[in-house]
Amino acid sequence: QLKCSIEKVSANVSDRATTLDVQALDNAICRAHSSIRVRNLHADYKHLYLSNRQTCCEQTLSPFNLFSFFSLQNLIIEVPENITKYPFTITKGQIDPTAADFCHFKQSFTLCWGSVLDALQALTKVLRDFAVPLAKVSGERLVDFCHSWGAGWRKAPSAITLLSVLENREEVSDLVSRPGQRYKGEGGVEAAAILIQSCWRRYSAKTAYRRLCRCNRAARTIAASWWRHAQRCRVKKALQARRFRQLENHRRRAQHLAANWKHIQSSKRTIIHIPSLGFSQSQRLKLRSYDILQNTQISRLCDVRDENVEVIYVCSLHLGEDILQYYSSLLSCDGATDGADTRNTQASLCKRRFIILTPEAVDYFPTHNMCLSTLLKYSPRTLKRIKHLIQGKQAYMVGGVSHMDDLAVADELDVPILGPEPAVSQLYNTKSGGRRIFAVAEVDVPPGQADIYSLNQLHETLAELMTQNINMQRWLFKMNLQHGGRVTAYCDVCHLGCYKWALQRYHRYGPDLWGSEWIQETVLLRYLDEIPEWLAHYAQPAKTSSYPSWSCFLKTFLRQGGVVEAYPPSESVTYLTVDMLLEPGGEVTMLSCGDQLHGSCQLEVIGSTVPQTSVHPDALHSICVRVGRACLQHLIVGYVSVGLATYMDNHTKEQKVWVIDLAVGYSDQLAMTQMLLMVTGGSLNCLRPAPFSSHRSEKRQHFYPLNCFAVIGSHLFHSNLSMLYHNTFLKTCKLHGIGFNKKQKQGTVFAFYDRSERRSIGMITVSEDLQGALVTFAQNLSVIHQQISSSKMQGETNFKVTDDLRTLFAFLEGKKKIMH
């Protein structure tokens, strides 16, 4: 077609110079553009055409030059975009075939009409579907669209793409995009019905699918829960069966131990000491430095003072080499307890009859505060080594606060336990359980009530006790499951508004009429009205670092249960602790007795003076034997500690002794007493009265030829001690005359518990008389405090508790008055 057009133009050009027909050239170019479209137009050729259009009219062109001009390689001749050619209209989706514009368009593109017709049909269908009243079509765009459609469209173009060939595409696009417009056109009702049905089917299917998914998830959850429940039940049954088997084995070995106890005590034996504190998990997590607390009874090693005893001590932490050498020197009795050169200690290590083992599980659970029995249970290498050490020997295990894992360890080692079953220990190792034992033993106890678990019960019980015991000035509240003064609170009746009123009526009516029913009921009702407010304002914990307020203490008290007891009605009260061994054979033996030393908290024990000088030994022995026999009746064997309080009754002028506490297990006082007997080489006779002074008359000297007194501090704490290593600390003490004289059997001995923090120590001071022991003990603490402290860094400590000698002398004078 281009060739024909050029020939027509060339025919009008003569052999001579002639002016080129520009109109004919434009028509030829337009027709060539409609049939030939070469992409990637070069900008220079387009510029060449636009700039030389006028020049071509004035120059003389030969047919050859004209043909060469249009035959340039990769040439694209293109009409400017703002010029629209071959437009026609579509009305209501229908094309008028007789319209002049459409006929002209059809005639111009006859050769490619097949593809154009397909595009026109698709376009008209879209216009009919959306009820477009008028659409103006650009012919050139339609042809270009047809060529691009046929060149590579994989699927039919969208309606928006088809509308791009319209000159009024913005108006048509707005109409097409109008919501609901599709349903106004051709087949709109059917399309709406199809859409509604499809939406409903989709909704129904989606709802059913979601319901099915929920059912499947519920089924999977139920199945998983049931599987876990069944698995948990199987594990629980297996554990119960294992624990029952361990309990049966424990009872069988306990019977064998009871039957052969006398023989075992008189022959060579191995004692496995596991100072485990089997508290509940909530208690263990609240205790700071729990591993060090479990190692405060490292003095159990001193059981080797019996030549027939070998000791295997399980330690709750890794001890340093300096601590091991210290205890090796101490137990070898070579006098090297002052940090002297220990180069020859290795020779004694080979001959020693004790070994210290640390379970490997200590490194696996450093922050879980597990009791020592549990750590040993999960330490197979340590258990295997203990088995090897006790193979072919008579051995038994001594624990601490009983725990179920004690049975597991004993069953794994196949050794008996010198102690009660864990359930029995947990039942009677509480404040309420102790009062039950004391009731069976028929010993004097302070007025009080056990097993209090509700606030109303607390108020009613307290009102009744205060009514019946009008002379009691202070009442104590003790938790069941914890030990020490930190779990005690108190409240003084002097702050109670109606107390003076009740006291006046007591003096008016006298003791006889005071016990009448109508007076008791009147006073009880008056107390009940004021006790809640009285407790809320004036009750306070004994140690505020553990429980800062009464509300905090009361919450834990009611959750655990506890005891309400009267404080002794005297200004001079002495507390003492007696350690006993309830032998499996049924005998009761007193092992240690000492008067308690209290810290900053009046009810917190930090040590004791041994032997006790507050109660006559015969009376003390009678009380302890009755308590011990009551414990044996309730299947409690092994080591127990009994706490007592003694004071002088102001009315009868007689000494009163109350039994206030029972602890089932090996005590810290007993462990330190073993160290005392080890370094002095003596023995403790709890049945013989002890003198107060070393200046005894010749008439009494033959009764007490080798008497001495000791002050034991088992829980001494100073934060500045961590600055000194143990060897340095011992050398510092030696420079200031603090040490133990082996020949005179007097002086000071220390007990170290850990190598990392080094804040807690134990100290024993031995002297000829009680006053000298107390003075030396206080002076030692004062010297140590001065050496490790400065004016700007005093540190946290309980050393200053006994730093005031006047307090100690008052303590001693109170003892003398009681004994007199």
Image: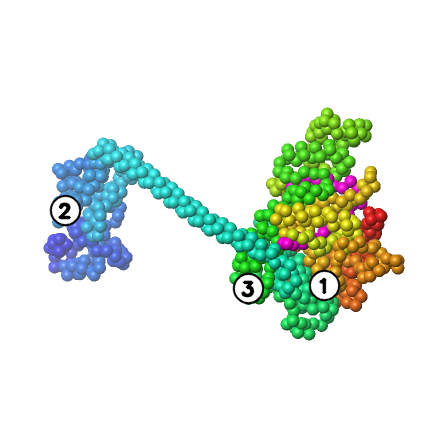
Give x and y (percent) for residue 404.
56, 52
Find disc 1 in the rendering and name its residue.
678
Type of amino acid under label 1? Met
Local crowd at mark 1 within 10 Å, few (<14), some, or many (≥20)? many
In the rendered image, the vertical position of residue 381 relative to residue 485, given as above or below: below
What segment carries the magenta color?
Answer: 562-585
Closer to the camera in the image, 779 or 244: 244
Closer to the camera in the image, 648 or 534: 648
Mark 3 vs mark 1, CA separation in Å: 28 Å
Secondary structure type for disc 1: helix
Q: Earlier in the sequence, mark 2 or mark 3?
A: 2
Secondary structure type for disc 2: helix
Mark 2 vs mark 3, CA separation in Å: 103 Å
Taking the view exactly as shown, the residue that stands out farthest to the top is: 518
Dominant secondary structure of the magenta stretch? strand
Looking at the image, which residue is at 72% across and 55% down?
592
Find disc 2 in the rendering and name its residue.
113
The tag on residue 720 is none
Local crowd at mark 2 within 10 Å, few (<14), some, or many (≥20)? some
Foreground mark, 2 or 3? 3
Type of amino acid under label 3? Lys
Find disc 3 in the rendering and name its residue.
387
Local crowd at mark 3 within 10 Å, few (<14), some, or many (≥20)? some
Looking at the image, which residue is at 22% across and 50% down?
154
Foreground mark, 1 or 2? 1
